[in-house]
Structures are given as structure tokens and as C-alpha cells.
Image (cartoon, grey):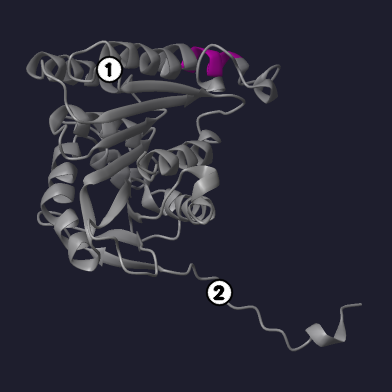
Amino acid sequence: MSNPQFRDATPAPVTMADTVFADLQFDGADQPHRIFLYRPAKAPPPEGWPVLYLTDGNACFATAVDALKVQSSYPNGTNVGEGVIVAIGYPSDQPYDPLRRSWDLSPPPGRIYPPFFPDSPDVKTGGGELFLTAIEGQLKPWIEEQVAIDSTRQSLFGHSFGGLFTLYALFSRPNAFNRWIAASPAIFWEDAAILSAEKAFLETHPAALDIEVHLSAGQYEGDILAPFHKGTAEEQKRQERARETRTIGYAREMTERLTASAALEDRAVFEEYPGENHMSVLPVALNRAVQIAFRRAK
């Protein structure tokens, strides 16, 4: 029997303090994007706040905000200071919009694939350049109207397709952000075409850039199969898929090339997260992104 004192208690929606969202329709887009914004409830420092931009905003925003709030409340113990989080998502209550993210987060030229679901549109890829242009030309100026930003401390995070987009943006416009964080990047996508962009980037940037790059993947995104998949009907299929995607291998090899290059000079890092698979790695990678983006200056 419930406590009588609880009888008049009415559940209410949960809200996140110091957060807002707005639906913005970028030039040339036929639908709006949902922009989530967290900003500390205090005056910014003279130089403005450091900022972390997130792709797949619906899936990432709340986790990143909680990680930042908890760690920035104890900066001497965590080395994490306060800052702003901007998450780019879609007007949906679901964590992902598969159709729209396939377009936004994939590098050009792209391809056309069969629909995800019956009676739904074909899946188109290749919108990454338009998405990056919208972020740089429209979203950043709008954010800077809402809150003071330190232009020298801007970070971009993406996971999976978002990680691929992060790499594409890095190789296309390396000065757009200062810290680049690509978790489980889909480097294999469309015949690993991003490797050509990497090669062009390294050839055209023979001098050191004032940026840092962090790539990562979960332990179970390589040759090691997650224990709960062993002995299942999907075991062989998953092993074949792992050999195709080579998430750990591609990311580790790219990091080795970047850190050996004149452009990065030992400022590219690869990290493997123990016990994590492609989806479970997301909260871990977001926490690391917060630590990288809001790391206090020594």
C-alpha cells in the first residue's frame, strides 16, 4: 500500500536547468534542425566561454550536459571548467533521424541507397559540405548572438557517421575548430573515400596547425567480439561486418599518420575504450569529449 502522503503527488515533466532549444531552418534546407543549447547561469569570462558542438544532438545533448555539470562543479579534482554545449539535432523525440543524418553527416559526392523502411524515401548521402557550411556560416553566428564564445576554444564531436563528418570537416576546414573529437568514425564508408580527403589534407598542410585531434573506438569494434554475441546466430555475420568496417584499425592507422605529420606534430591521439561496443561507447566518448573541450589551461 502506498504512503498516504504520496496520493496528491502529480508527476511533472523533467526539465534541464540552463538549457533551451530552437528550431532553425538553414538556407537551402527544406526542414529545420533542432539546436540544443546549454550555457552556464553566470556571466562569461572576458574572453567568452569555450564551446563544444555535438552532432546527433538528440542522442548526445543530455549526456554531455550532465557530464559537464558534474565535473565542472569540482574543477580542481577533474581539470574540467565551465562552458557552452551546442547540439545539432532534429525536431523529433527520438534519439536519431536515420534519413536526415545520412544526408547531413556523410561527405560528398554521396550515393543513393534503398529506403530504410517500406514506403519511405530513398536514402541519400553526400550532404556533409552543405551541413558544414551551415554550421560555419549560420549556426555559429547565431550561437554567438546568444552567448559570448571564446573563438580559440571551439570543439567538434561526432560519433559513427558523426565521427566521419568530424573528420571530413577537419580535412576540409581545419581551422573551423580547435579540438576535433571523432568517436567510432565510419572511415570505411563508401569505399573509405575519406582517406582521399585525409591524403589531400596532409599534402596541403606541410606546417603545424594549432589544433588537436582525438579518435576513439570501443574494444568490441575490432577483432574481438562482445561476449554476449559469442555463440549466437549472428556471431558469424557480426565478425564479417567487423572485418569490413575495421573501426579500430582504420582509426588507429589514421591517428598514426596524423600524429606523424607536420600538420599535427604529435597532437593526434587514439583511445580504445575497454568493454564497449559501437553503441555503448557513446556515453563514454561524450564524457571524454567534455574533458577535452573544457580542459582547463595549465
Asked if 207 appears above or below 32 in the picture, the reply is above
Callout 2 secondary element: loop
Q: Main secondary structure of the magenta part?
A: helix
Q: Quadrant of residue 204?
A: top left
Crowding around mark 1 (Cα neighbors within 10 Å: few <14, some 14 to 19, many 20+) is few
Q: Closest to the observer: 226 or 111?
A: 226
Residue 159 locus on image (x, y percent): 39, 36
Q: Amino acid at mark 2?
A: Pro
Which region is colored magenta? Answer: 236-241
Crowding around mark 2 (Cα neighbors within 10 Å: few <14, some 14 to 19, many 20+) is few
* Residue 94 in sight: yes
Residue shown at 48% from the left, 67% from the top: 16
Residue 44 colored magenta? no
As measured in the structure, the alpha-carbon distance from the residue carrying label 2 to the one carrying label 1 is 44 Å
Residue 248 locus on image (x, y percent): 44, 17
Instruction: Please give the label number shown on residue 192.
Output: 1
- Say which residue label 2 marks: 13
